[in-house]
Amino acid sequence: MPPSAQTDDRTAAATLKAPKTILMATDLSARSDRALERAVTLAKQHQARLVILNIIDEDLPSSVQDRVRDATLTEIQNSLDRVDGAEALDPSVEAIAGKDYRDILDHADAIAADLIVLGIHRNEAGNKPIAGTTMERVIRKGQKPVLVVPNRTEGTYNKVAVAVDFSAYSRIAIRQALTLAPGAEFNAIHSYHVPFGGFQRGRETRNAYRDEHERTLTQLIEEELETLIGSASQPDIPFHKVIKQGETQSVIRSEVERLQPDLLVLGTHGRVGLTHALLGSIAESFLNNPPCDVLVVKAW
């Protein structure tokens, strides 16, 4: 490893940490109740500060806003009362006047949130695109990791799948997964293709490419584990490598179906080029109809 990379890893090791402030944004729906359960579980697990936020339409008359705020705070407290362990956390509950996703992102910045937790959007059947939803805009426009929760929480995360290639955002996705779900079983899913495979001899060529990708992926995972161990002292982390030839989205989907993880972690680009306007196609596909909790992590 070149000296600059070693320096980068040492810097990452020094700053790598579990979330200390979690922002959970709620629209008071049943979908948000599932996200609230997960946010409470994570806050307890990491001894983190939990802030629960609801945005009240700022176009409402002020007198109506006041009544809506009172009712909102009562409803959120009622939801918290139904979640085991929430009372001990003493979470902050806030209802503020605003307009859209920007108020969630501004609040996340104001409280220095390390993680934003959201329920899934109203399209539960997965038959409409997520484009234009609050969830999509929070992920696309923001820089913080976003956890999307579709299902009821059943304890801490036990099995995590991380979709990886050899990019900066995959490295950061691995780090976020390791810190968010300590003690879980980790599975790194990587797909590859054989260039001009139709013009080359079959098995020998495929095996050569597979072996090359396995060596590179092993090095990537070992470096990230070393970084985590150096910063968090967790030497016994089960990390399984899944390497398959095929189209990336198909490979990830088939492996998620086989592994049945309770958390899928996806790295995506920051605000560069078209990614400012569009989510990565893989992230968008899984967020349209998430098979489990999905954590979306940006590299910059």
Image (spheres, rainbow, N blue to C red):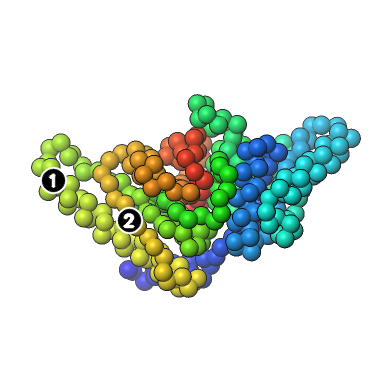
Give the quadrant of the N terminus: bottom left
Residue density around tag 1, few if under 14, some if 14–19, many if 20 or more, within 10 Å: few
Residue drawn at x 56%, y 42% is: 151
- In the rendered image, the vertical position of residue 95 relative to residue 166, given as above or below: above
The answer to whether residue 278 is above or below residue 231 is above
Determine whether 123 is above or below 149 in the image.
Answer: above
Compared across the picture, whether 74 is left or right of 139 comes to right
Q: Nearer the viewer, residue 43 or 68?
A: 43
- Give x and y (percent) for residue 193: 25, 43
Residue 51 visible in the snapshot: yes
Q: Residue at x 59, y 53 (%)?
A: 115
Amino acid type at image mark 1: Arg
Residue where numbered disc 1 is placed: 203
Residue 21, image x, y percentages: 65, 58
Q: Amino acid at mark 2?
A: Lys
Distance of label 1 from label 2 (alpha carbons) = 21 Å
> Can you tell which quarter of the image residue 226 is in?
bottom left
Q: Locate residue 221 relative to residue 49 in the image: left or right.
A: left
Relative to residue 6, is residue 19 drawn left or right? right
Q: Decide which of tag 1 and tag 2 comes sooner along the chain.
A: 1
Quarter assignment of residue 89: bottom right
